[in-house]
Every structure is written in C-alpha cells, then in structure tokens.
Amino acid sequence: MRYSAAVIALFIASVPLAAQSYRAPRTPDGHPDLQGIWQVMNTAAVNLEDHIATLGMPAGRSVIVDPPDGKIPYTPAAALQQKENYKNRAKADPLNICYIPGVPRVMYLPFPIQIVQTPKFVLMASEFAHSLRRVFMDGTKHPDVALFWIGDSRGHWEGETLVVDVANNLPDTWFDRSGNFHSDALHIVERITRTEPDILTYEARIEDPQVFTRPWTMRMFLYRHKEPNLQLLEYECNAYLEDAEKESK
Amino acid sequence: MRKLNTLNLVVAAVTAAALMTFAPVPGEGQDAPKGGRGGGKGKGGPPGGEQYGPYYAAPVKPGDPVGRTPDGQPDMQGFWTPRFNQAIFEVQDHPKAQPGIGPGKGAIVDPADGRIPYKPEAAARAQELLSKQIYLEPEAHCYVSGVPHAAYQQFGYQIVQPTGYVLFLTEYAHTYRAVPTDGRPHISPNIKMFRGDSVGKWEGGTLVIDTTNQNGKTWFDMAGNFTTPAIHVVERYTPVDTNNVNYEAVVDDSTIYTQPWKIAGQLGRHPDLNMELMEFACVEGNQDLVHYTEGVGGKAKEKGALTK
C-alpha cells in the first residue's frame, strides 16, 4: 500500500499522543510529575523548517508537523518580511542582543531547562539569561494590562498532558535564528506530555492571523539530563556581549 | 488598538524604570544632586523626606504561626518586600550624599559602626569605584545581582518552595535564584557565576543558605562596594510568622576585609496576596548604556556626551 507524503505526515502528526500508554509518576497533589532538567536535541533554534547547513548553523529537519509540508504558512507580505529578517539576522535577531527569548523559542534553545512544580505553579527555568516561565495553574486568566517578552502562561491538566495557553506576547521576539517571526497577535497553546520516563513530548500550536494564513503546529522531544551532578549554571548573555564589544575595540 | 496601547505603556514603564538609575553628575559649582533610585518627588532618598516609598516598605503587622509545606519545610511562599534601610543605595551607613545616592542608613549590624571593615587598599578601590558608580554600577548594565544583594533586591521577590528547593523569583530582570535543599555539595570552585552557587538546609525554623562561586563582578549596592570571587556568604532566613521573616547574613572575604561582617534586615509579606510578578525587562529597556560614553563602557560618542 502506498501513502502520499502528506497522508503519512498527517498520520505521524495525529498518532503519538492518542496512542500514549505511559503513565507518569504523580506529584503529591496528584498531577503528572514533569520535574527535572530537560533539553532538546534538535536544530529548531537554528530554523524550525527544513534547512541545510550554513556557517555555524547545522542542517536539520522541520519540527513542524502541521501543515504537512513542514513549512510555516506565512501570508505573502509576512514571507517577504521573513526573508528580510533572514538577511539581516546577524543584527536583527533579538537573541543576538541578549533579549528575553520569548515562547516557544526558550523551550528549544541549546540550553537546559529545569521544570519544578507546586500546586499553584509549573516553573520552567532556562539557563539562558536566567529566563523564567511561570505557568499559573490556579485557574486565573491572562491579565488585561500588559504584554511581556516571555508572554503570560496559564495552564491546566488534561490527563497526562500539561496544556498551557500563552498570550500577552510582545511582537519583538523571533522563533529561531532564521528570522521566523510573529506579531503581537501571537497566541500559543502548548501541550507537554511525559510520554516516556525520560522524554517530554512538546507540542505548540501557533496562531497569529496577522502573519500566518492558518494555525500551525510544531512538535519535538525534550530529553531528560541524567548526568548525576548536573545543575543549571548561568549564561548571562548581556554581560558577555559587553565583554565581546570591549575586546573588539 | 488596545494591545498596541498597552505595549507602549509597558515600553514606557520599562524605559522609565531603566532611566531611574540615570542621575546627572554634578558640574563645577553645583551641589551634588540628591536624585536617584527611589528619589520620591525628585528629592532623592528618604532621609529627611518621605519615610516609605517604592523602595522603602512599611513594617508589616504580625501574622499567624508559620505553616509547613507538604514536605515539612517552614512555609515562606509568597511575595516579600525587603526592609534593609537604604542598603540598595549603599549597604553601609552613608551619612554624606553622593551623586545619585542620598544620605542614609545601611544594613550592617556588625561591626557596630555600620561600615564595611575594608583593608586599606580595598577601601581605596571602593572609593575609586564610588566616584565612577554612575557608569560602573552593575545593575546599570543589567547584570543579575549576587548574594546577599539578591536578598534586598529592589522591587522584592516571590519565594516558591517545590520539593527539594527554595526558589527566589525576582521582578528585576525577570530572573530566578534556585537554592537546592537536598544536601548536595557546592560545585567545583573552577566555575564562577554572577549568582554564585547556593546550597541550603533547614536548621529548625531557619533556612541557612551557603553561597560560594561568585564571580566578583557584582556589588552590594550602587556605591562601589565591590566583591571578589573569594566571597563566602552564609544567609539565615527565619520566618517568625506568616507575615514576617528575619534575615541576616555573614559576609567573609579575607582578601579584602579585616574581619567577617554581618547585615540584617526583614522581609514583609506583600499586602496583596493575589499579586503577580510583572516583567522588569532590564536589557530590553535599558537606556543607560546609550547615554554613557564609550570611554566608560557605554555607547555614546565622546563628543557632546554628558561627561567623561
């Protein structure tokens, strides 16, 4: 039997969570325990889409599972903007001047993320610039007052899965080093599931009608760090940037 | 558009916050201005002016007996406002005004004179840094604070206690400080960091945090009181009721001090129990470096710049 690539991609996109059988251990308050130090092993931070290698940026396959072609469904104007961003990325990438990476980018940077849980919060602490995500688990709503670099995250549990709604995003963050971008209309729904003892399946549905013709979804794994002495250190980006600027003078 | 309007507000607020660290340098024949962080109504710090303001919290009324977390730790979770006199400006008593720093009390309780027991050459270095603090103060560069400065961080912090950790989440620069309480040893002395390496343990009702591995790039305050990588700090957080925590820290560094010294202060629970931290996005809104000249590490050209 032969399937078209699109059908196979759809199949892959829809099966893993439905077919999940692993049941994660529970925290004292009865929710799946996602705690630990995690990190991706992919090149999404370079480019979410399929990409060949360039200097300092390894090749990698698209982490976008919907649409099935693995491409971000930009409007024509936004596609031009992305090309412009790519061309200017050395100066225009907000991470190159050490800004807070935003969501979802902070989740797949090449830096470890520590997750801790309390009944009120799921906290995600990245080693990159001490960036912190606080996911409120107390049923509260997004504030109506401000936009944040790291957005505003409110979560709830659906069985094995932590579902996080991310709004109040500033428009100035990028998705990756290749200029993939969004506007302040960005709305993200993340689904994070411990599908195996040492794997978190991370999925983010991206919606932004000002930039994309339709919502799209990325999916990837975060792997548990198992080195016995591992702990988060620090990457104080802006301090190193200052040092580098001084050295280059 | 509502969101664009709120965006502007946020950008304005963050920019304003960053600019608050920016104070003019007195020219010849001028009095030293008394402005600076927390300078209410443009008059500078609190001494002689208002007693409490954005950086000077009022004492908090006694609360209920301290509760316990599910794993049995004394429960300090919530939002806390530090009260350490005017230590964020200068950690030692500072009766004389400096540019951007009003006169005031610090938080040192030992030695009794409230001053850091510097060795002579270290005292000279602190004085030199004080004269350039406008440009060199680490927070003007958006560096995260070291320890114990983090305990009296401006804008306060939230404490969260998941199993095995005490976490301090600060609004300033939107960062965190993670203190494991699982008995692990310090990391290798080969690794130095702005935040250092903190390990904690509960001694009865007191959280004792031992911090080493700092990189010597942070200050205690805005006033040039510097640190070195040899600094060793032992902090003690003692919750006395649900609204109040007593704090003290012993600071030791035999390379620059003649004896260990101690600071003390209190944390008061924020009156709004439903408060949420906002995002003080320091690097993103920082205007200081734009105005400082290249000669002192900023980005402005020398000609026509404010000062050298």
Image (cartoon, rainbow, N blue to C red):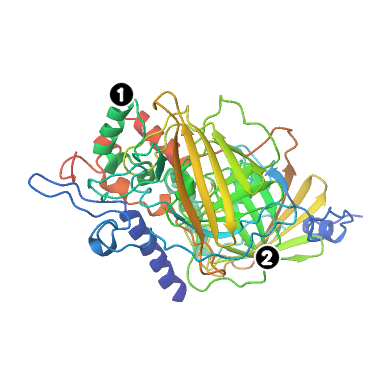
Residue at 38% x, 52% y: name it: B85
* Amino acid at circle 1: Glu
Write down the chain letter for disc 1.
B
Position of B291 compared to A248: left or right?
A: left
Q: Are marks 1 and 2 on the same chain?
A: no
The quadrant where residue B222 appears: top left
Above or below, comparing residue B95 to residue B199 in the picture? below
Q: Position of residue A42 (x, y in %)?
A: 68, 42
Label 2 Cα crowd, 10 Å radius (few <14 / some 14-19 / many 20+): many
Q: Chain ID for label 2?
A: A
| Residue B179 quadrant | top right
Residue bearing mark 1: B121
Measured along the vertical axis of the image, is residue A152 above or below residue B177? Answer: below
User: What residue do we see at 60% from left, 26% from top?
Assistant: B188
Residue named by callout 2: A137
- In front: B168, or B110? B110
Residue in view at x 92 percent, y 55 percent: A1
Taking depth in this image into account, of B21 and B2 the one nearest to the observer is B21
Q: Which marked residue is nearer to the observer: mark 1 or mark 2?
A: 1
B197 over B5 or under it: above or below: above
Residue type at tag 2: Met
- Asked whether disc 1 touches disc 2, contact meaning CB atoms under 8 Å apart, the reply is no
Q: How many marks?
A: 2
Visible residue check, residue B23: yes
Count residues near mark 1 (Cα–Cα under 10 Å), then give few for <14, some for 14-19, many for 20+: few
Q: Quadrant of the C terminus of chain A?
A: top left
Tag 2's secondary structure?
loop
> For this rendering, which residue is in front, A2 or A61?
A61
The foreground one among A101 and B139 is B139
